[in-house]
Image (cartoon, rainbow, N blue to C red):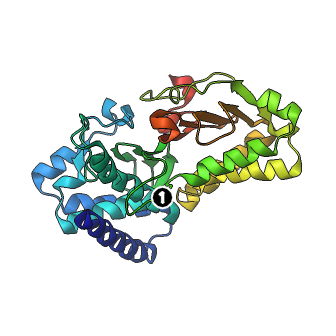
Amino acid sequence: MHRIKTSLVLAAIGVVTLALWAGAYVEQTGSRMAVAAGRFLAALSHEQAAKATYPFEAPERLDWHFIPRPRKGLPIKELKPEQRSLAFGLIASGLSGSGVLKATTIMSLEQILKELEQGGRMIRDPELYYLTIFGTPTDRGKWGWRVEGHHLSLNFALEDGKIVAATPVFFGANPAEVRQGPRQGLRTLADREDRALRLLQALDENQRKSVLFAPKAPADIRAANTPQPPTDPAVGVAAADLNQDQRAMLRALIESYSQDMPDEVAQAWLQEIRRAGPDAIRFTWAGPADRSQPHAYRVQGPSFLIEFNNTQNGANHIHSVWRNMLGDFGIPLAAR
């Protein structure tokens, strides 16, 4: 455990150093990603690079998931210390500071699961997170990259130095709250859960009637491992029917997701929401208004979909995702 925590701290130091260095020369996030990805690939052996790279149009680019399963790409486990710093530098280029903290904490929860399960059937390893590069990192043409492992999936597509897609974005946490041991009380995704609960509890009786889509929460989020989000119409209470304070709570909930992304991505998401009309956003809940009981929620507008589920392991196991209703992976939804 000590070795893993030390490794994460050293990686974080490497992230900060690389980000400061790159930021002095490159302003645009897409260009920073190309620099970080290029440096990462240049540090790999021929065999490692072969595992880490695929053509941009490879079907593998769309094969995302958050379960513990074999993956294509190069795992952190197989990297030398200097390569790890560059790998975490690339990961950091796709996240804000709060996002980096959440991602690395999610990785570290694998060690807690390993200790809790004591020889369970699942392989739990904080180093089984895979980096995959699609195409050639450059400011000309198309390329993309992914980091993925249990409860974490970040997917980016770039064209001519600009990020054209940053979804699906999945963050999960098991345990959602660490209830024993030296990290007791840790809640990796507390903001995503607590802000939704505050909004739910602020609704009046009539609003509560329209916000519930099911008395019992579904077993999981919808459309996992699919290249595009579900297209069912949004349900629940509309933002147009909220008062000023409730609208502020809804914005805060949405921002608990967007604020974990690089500023350019976060601002693009929020601008899309404003262009599409925030009054059309709907918030819906399933299950009791109690985080100790199985519950789920969705926030959906014309341009985006948030799904959150905490039903497994006695309502102590979170799945959360942001998807683009215009099309994930940079592929227009109508094209599929």
Q: Is residue 139 visible?
A: no
Residue 201: quadrant of the picture: top right
Q: Along the horizontal axis of the image, is 176 left or right of 63?
A: right
Q: Is residue 169 above or below residue 162?
A: above
Q: Is residue 100 visible?
A: yes
Q: 97 or 327: which is nearer to us?
A: 97
Give the residue type that dot 1 points to: Leu
Secondary structure at numbered mark 1: loop
Q: Along the horizontal axis of the image, is 70 left or right of 310?
A: left
Q: 158 or 122: which is nearer to us?
A: 122
Q: 293 or 304: which is nearer to us?
A: 293
Q: Tell me what residue is drawn at x 73 percent, y 51 percent.
A: 251
Q: Is the residue marked by circle 1 packed among few (<14), some (14-19), or many (20+) residues within 10 Å?
A: some
Q: Tell me what residue is drawn at x 38 percent, y 46 percent.
A: 144
Residue 82, percent from left and from top: 21, 69
Residue 189, percent from left and from top: 53, 52
Kindly identify which residue carries mark 1.
186
Q: Which residue ends up furthest to the front in the rendered image?
A: 180
Residue 214, percent from left and from top: 67, 23
Which part of the image, by quadrant, shows the N terminus? bottom left
Q: Tell me what residue is drawn at x 22 percent, y 48 percent.
A: 74
Q: 221 or 64: which is nearer to us?
A: 221
Residue 283, percent from left and from top: 72, 36
Q: Is residue 121 above or below residue 269?
A: above
Q: Tell me what residue is drawn at x 45 percent, y 78 percent.
A: 24
